[in-house]
Image: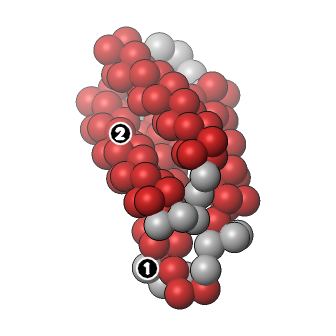
Amino acid sequence: MTVKYYKDLLIWNKAKDLVKEVYIAIRKFPEIEKYILISQILRSANSIPTNIAEGQARQHSKEFIQFLHIALGSLAELDTQLCISKDLGYLTEEELNKFDMKITELRKMTRGLISKL
């Protein structure tokens, strides 16, 4: 795989778009969650494109794969945190379903990229 810059990766762009959507969704969360759930959600969401970028920048397949596995872990964390947010009434079922589709797509793309490296 010959991508010279992480910004050229579709997976990085989709992960970055997910972060933006997460930021929009958490605006309506209660203030009490500012340092707890919101903080965890933002860390896991931002970790996804960040690890994709860092891994690609390393220029070695083994390192890239390692960072893609970290991104997969962050996807699982984000998925869990969004499910908890729905259970607490901060997200609707529809919002959670939209996030679930995007997370599932990114998970498949990440696994596919790992298998190609």
- Label 2 is placed on what type of residue? Leu
Q: Quick check: 48 above or below 11?
A: below
Q: Is any atom of residue 38 visible in this view?
A: yes
Which residue is identified by label 2? 72
Q: Closer to the camera, 6 or 104?
A: 104
Q: Residue at x 63, y 42 (%)?
A: 94
**x and y, in percent, of residue 90 in the image:** 57, 65
Indicate left or right for 24 with 60 as reference. Answer: right
Q: Are marks 1 and 2 in contact (CB under 8 Å)?
A: no
Which residue is identified by label 1? 36
Q: Quick check: 12 above or below 89?
A: above
- Label 1 is placed on what type of residue? Ile
Q: Closer to the camera, 45 or 100?
A: 100
**x and y, in percent, of residue 24 in the image:** 72, 59
Q: Secondary structure at mark 1?
A: loop
Q: Is any atom of residue 16 visible in this view?
A: no
Q: Secondary structure at mark 2?
A: helix
**x and y, in percent, of residue 97 in the image:** 56, 37
Q: Closer to the camera, 86 or 26?
A: 86
Q: Residues within 10 Å of mark 1 (few under 14, many from 20)?
A: few
Q: Earlier in the sequence, mark 1 or mark 2?
A: 1
Quadrant the C terminus occupies: top left
